[in-house]
Image: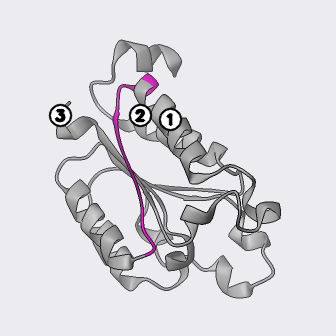
Amino acid sequence: MSAERRLFVLNGPNLNLLGRREPDIYGTATLADVEQLCRTEAETAGLELVFRQSNAEHALLEWIHEAFEGAAGIIINPAAFTHGSHALYDALKICTCPIIEVHLSNPHARSEAWRATSLISPVVTGIITGLGVEGYRLAIRAIARRTPARTAAAAEAA
């Protein structure tokens, strides 16, 4: 599949603990469940999924740089890096593909005031918060609609 059909889904720190970490906030789905949901949705949309997670900011930066050259889009759940990473802001700012910021919980409804500020929101195409893992499905559909030369199957699904 061409680079223009590659969809990067990038997950930040502690998301490897989904299903075990604060299930009352983040739900019971595991990261493997999220990946399967994303694979199914990307396949339906005719997109090649690149699904990754790291607790290290530099890894996320490298993957954004990889996506810079012609990816169909980036879906990023930067987790705690949302609130403090100027480096992610700078990397995402130079990307020309659609970028959707996804959060499982609604940061604005959380008790910690600092969670309400996203450093990367000003440079993304859209933001989906508070819908749990369904936010990933919606983000994939949004990117598929913005991607030229969609497959017939993706067009029918939309």
Foreground disc of the pair 3, 1? 3
Q: x%, y% of residue 91?
A: 29, 72
**In the rendered image of this protein, does residue 82 appear above or below residue 23?**
below
Amino acid carrying label 1: it is Arg
Q: Are marks 2 and 1 in contact (CB under 8 Å)?
A: yes
Would you call the spot at circle 1 few (<14 residues within 10 Å), some (14-19), or many (20 or more)? some
The span from disc 3 to disc 1 (Cα, nearest Å) is 19 Å
Amino acid carrying label 2: it is Ala
**Residue at 72% across / 64% down in the picture?**
106
Question: What secondary structure is found at the residue carrying circle 2?
Answer: helix
Residue 141's tag is 1
Query: Looking at the figure, which quarter contains the N terminus?
Result: top left
Residue 50 belongs to magenta span: yes
First in sequence, mark 2 or 3: give its number: 3
**Residue at 65% across / 43% down in the picture?**
134
Residue bearing the label numbered 2: 144
**In the rendered image of this protein, does residue 158 appear above or below residue 90?**
above
The span from disc 2 to disc 3 (Cα, nearest Å) is 15 Å
Q: x%, y% of residue 122?
A: 46, 70
The magenta segment: 44-55
Closer to the camera, 158 or 87? 87
Amino acid carrying label 3: it is Ser
Closer to the camera, 77 or 108? 77
Residue 78's tag is none
